[in-house]
Amino acid sequence: MSTEIGVHLPCGQCQKQVRGRVAVLINFEKSPEWEARLLADDLNRLTCGCGFRMTYMRTVGTVDFARKTCAYGYPSSLEVYWQDLGLAVEAAFRRNWVVGAPPVVRATASEWRVRAVMGYEGLREQRVISLAGLDDVQVETTKLHLLAGRPEWAGARVWLRAVSADRLLFRVDTLDVSQRAAADVPREWLSLPAPDHVLPGALDADPFVSFRKLWIRPKPVPPDLVRLDGRWEVYTTQVDQREPVIRF
């Protein structure tokens, strides 16, 4: 089963109370409607009667028992705590799938891919990777090659958006909105080796499998953020961006 909760918050435009239900844990096999909303960039979006749209951003977990994948998505503002978040995800998985699970579940625990990601984009990307049968370490390595030699994309977040038989489509979210773009690259890039400055095992040494860990020195989670599952933020989602596509 999936888990959802009711929320209410003031509209960012008219200040009226907006009520709705948001996902906390998504079981993809049991809740195809939540999977569809995730893939459509509509996860936990609330719309006021005045037409104003908001995204209720909180910690959300996803699980797929058939593909043996589990991911926790945290608000992107917590990325600097990526190391502790990865440890928290590992501990939660061990608690639920090893220590407190029946023998038949424990027997498969080592086969699961367990990830800590940032934001709903991270959850969506993990689902795209899983459905396409890709290795997320190879995807992160491909992102490094994509960013190489492009200083205008320094500090960017890069998300895999779509996969076809011979192409990969990424979205590059730069700090400078004017430089944001979509990148269409050959699928063969997945076979490229990691750049020389990336040590073997560096990308997947913990559940936060992201090239951005090479840039961000982790900080410990402060005491007031220990209850990570209860933290939430609201973002305005009035306009859907359309970035220029750069084909490689």
Image (cartoon, rainbow, N blue to C red):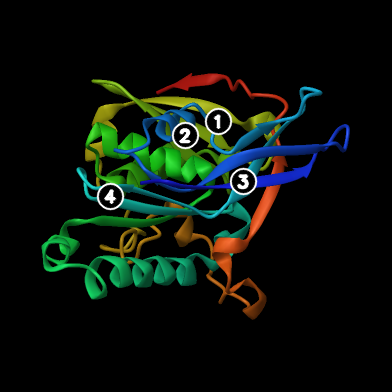
Q: How far apart in space, not on screen, are marks 3 and 2 (Cα)? A: 18 Å
Mark 1: give few (<14), some (14-19) or many (20+) Cα within 10 Å.
Answer: some
Q: Residue at x 70, y 24 (%)?
A: 239
Residue 139 rendering spot, x and y as whole percentages: 33, 42
Would you say residue 148 is visible in this rendering? Answer: no
Task: Determine whether label 3 and label 2 are within 8 Å by CB.
Answer: no
Q: Horizontally, is 96 left or right of 8 in the view?
A: left
| Amino acid type of the residue that numbered disc 1 sits on in the rendered structure | Asp
Mark 4: give few (<14), some (14-19) or many (20+) Cα within 10 Å.
Answer: some
Residue of label 2: 38
Mark 2: give few (<14), some (14-19) or many (20+) Cα within 10 Å.
Answer: some
Would you say residue 225 is visible in this rendering? Answer: yes
Residue of label 4: 69
Q: From this view, report whether residue 228 is shown above or below residue 41.
A: below
Residue 144 rendering spot, x and y as whole percentages: 40, 45
Q: Residue at x 64, y 31 (%)?
A: 179
Task: Determine whether label 3 and label 4 are within 8 Å by CB.
Answer: no
Q: Horizontally, is 14 left or right of 148 in the view?
A: right
Between 105 and 188, the one lying in front of the other is 105
Task: Determine whether label 2 and label 1 are within 8 Å by CB.
Answer: yes
Q: Secondary structure at mark 1?
A: loop
Q: How far apart in space, not on screen, are marks 2 and 1 (Cα)? A: 6 Å
Q: Secondary structure at mark 2?
A: helix
| Amino acid type of the residue that numbered disc 3 sits on in the rendered structure | Gly
| Amino acid type of the residue that numbered disc 2 sits on in the rendered structure | Leu
Q: Residue at x 48, y 72 (%)?
A: 84
